[in-house]
Amino acid sequence: MRKLLLTAGLACTLAGALPSRADAQAFLTPFAGVTFNGDAPAKKLTYGGGLTFMGKAAGLDLDLGYTPDFFNQNDADVVLVGDNNVTTVMASLVVGPGVGPVRPYGVAGVGLIRSRIDGGDIFDAVSTNDFGVNAGVGVLGKMGGHAWIRGEVRYFRSLQDPSSDGDLDVTLGKFDFWRGTIGVSFSLGGD
């Protein structure tokens, strides 16, 4: 129950960061890129999408990422585990200038990191749902009309409750990785 209340509180806090309708600009961004470093044994294709609401200085970003075959190495002869993937769902605060043709920004937030590994004939399938954090930097550059190019790098890390005493004591977990992406953003309002 405490985790549910914490999640609801964080969602309300992030919702309060939304810009007012009069000065907001929304971006829908499909993206592709790679995961690397940390617990990623090799660079892997990742893809997903984001919905960003940006005011003049801050906004809210909702991000969904999916990385198939996350835990295997690139070498076809070396297969560590069977079918596997990592999915991230994050709600983040975005800070940066919301005006002009080039818009650098920083992003940080919380959400879910889901890992799934199919053990095949060796062991049962394993999946985990962990709270997680993410932080990164990026840039939006106007291409023309309502189209923008977006590039960013984010760091993801799981959170954990180190004790089973019933209290919610959150610390940084051990699972982490980086993600670099590029995408075309479509402006849903404003310039």
Image (cartoon, rainbow, N blue to C red):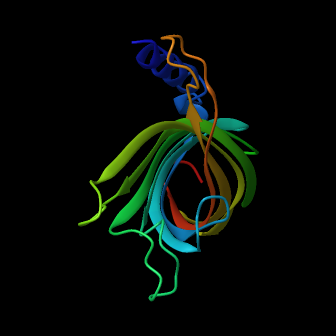
Q: Is residue 11 left or right of residue 107?
A: left
Q: Quadrant of residue 4?
A: top left
**Does residue 100 show up?**
no
Q: Nearer the viewer, residue 133 or 84?
A: 84
Within the image, what quadrant is residue 95 found in? top right
> For the point 73% across and 49% down, which residue is it?
105
Residue drawn 47% across the image and 66% down it? 70
Tell me where residue 14 appears, x and y as whole percent. Answer: 57, 26
Q: Residue at x 61, y 36 (%)?
A: 109
**Above or below for 67 versus 169:** below
Residue 159 position in % (x across, y down): 58, 34
The quarter holding residue 82 reads bottom left
Query: In the orientation shown, which residue stands out farthest toward the left?
Result: 121
User: Can residue 64 be seen by looking at this rendering?
Assistant: yes
Counting from the top left corner in percent of width and height, residue 83 is at 32, 68
| Front residue (pair 83, 136) | 83
